Image (cartoon, rainbow, N blue to C red):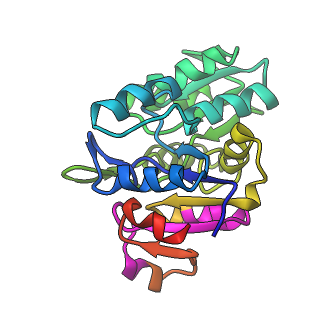
Amino acid sequence: MSYAAAFVDLDGTVWRGRSAIPGANAGLRALRDAAVPIVFLTNNTGVRRDEVTSRLDAIGIDYRGEPVVTAAWATAAYLAEHRPDADVHVMGRETVEAEIEDAGLTLSTEGRADVVVAGYDDRVDFARLTGTLRAFGPGTVFVATNRDRTTPEEDGPVPGANAFVSAIEGMVDQEPVVVGKPETRMAALAAAEVDVNVHDCLMIGDNLETDVLMGERAGMDTALVCSGVSAREDVAASEIEPTYVVDDLGEIGSLL
């Protein structure tokens, strides 16, 4: 097959924790050899777009300056477009706060806010939960960076952003606007980075419920790599149907 671009997930596809996944370099090389532009597309909110280079270099992944779309950056872009004058309260990583400030919005640290953004938060405690609860008022918009259930680490899965988003949802009884995968906003941003039609692209990732579902919703072909969250037996039990299933990114050349 020939694709206008490949959207490549990071966690569970290229790296796991602080280690490269075997086959990652071979898969990226196969895409480049086939002249398929690469966009790295991730729900990870712990790394800024300009930090991906050093992180990939540190684990021995050959990075050629390809565009990166993260859920943190995408959330900031969404708010800049739809609520550019909002005061924003964040329960999430410092990366999310930095991206929102860089997008020209104002961070709110206490009291009522126009928007509450929630995502993975390794600083969460009772005080942060209380502050987030009190940031809600009439008309406050609730936004989630993503709703990943888990994140693959070297020694096993850890809670994903959904653990924190659901805690807030339970307090305020309000569903969030979700920016990250599996919502198609991320696919549209990735396609815009390389100026292609999203329907002509291939989504590659390790998670049926985020990567593959987003690709399916966006009308893309999808490739599930079984090196992270989802396994082959999960495909058989799911209504989400990837176009291809491979063991890891190293096998992606067989699809091109």
Q: Residue at x 58, y 22 (%)?
A: 99
Q: Reply yes or no: does residue 19 show up in magenta.
A: no
Q: Reply yes or no: does residue 217 show up in magenta.
A: yes
Is 116 displayed left or right of 93 in the figure? right
Q: Is residue 206 above or below residue 53?
A: below
Task: Give the x, y percent position of residue 164.
Answer: 45, 43
Is the N terminus in the top left, top right, bottom left or bottom right quadrant?
bottom right
The residue closer to the viewer here, 45 or 124, is 45
Q: Is residue 125 visible?
A: no
Which quarter of the picture shows residue 84?
A: top right
Is 234 displayed left or right of 111 in the figure? left
Task: Give the x, y percent position of residue 62.
Answer: 38, 38
The residue closer to the viewer here, 84 or 65, is 65
Is 140 displayed left or right of 68 in the figure? right
The residue closer to the viewer here, 165 or 42, is 42
Q: Which residues are magenta?
A: 212-234
Is the C terminus in the top left, top right, bottom left or bottom right quadrant?
bottom right
Which quarter of the picture shows residue 211?
A: bottom right
Q: Is residue 84 visible?
A: yes
Most extreme residue toward the front is: 33
Task: Give the x, y percent position of residue 149.
Answer: 43, 56
Q: Residue at x 34, y 31 (%)?
A: 57
Q: Residue at x 66, y 64 (%)?
A: 2
All told, the count of numbered labels is 0
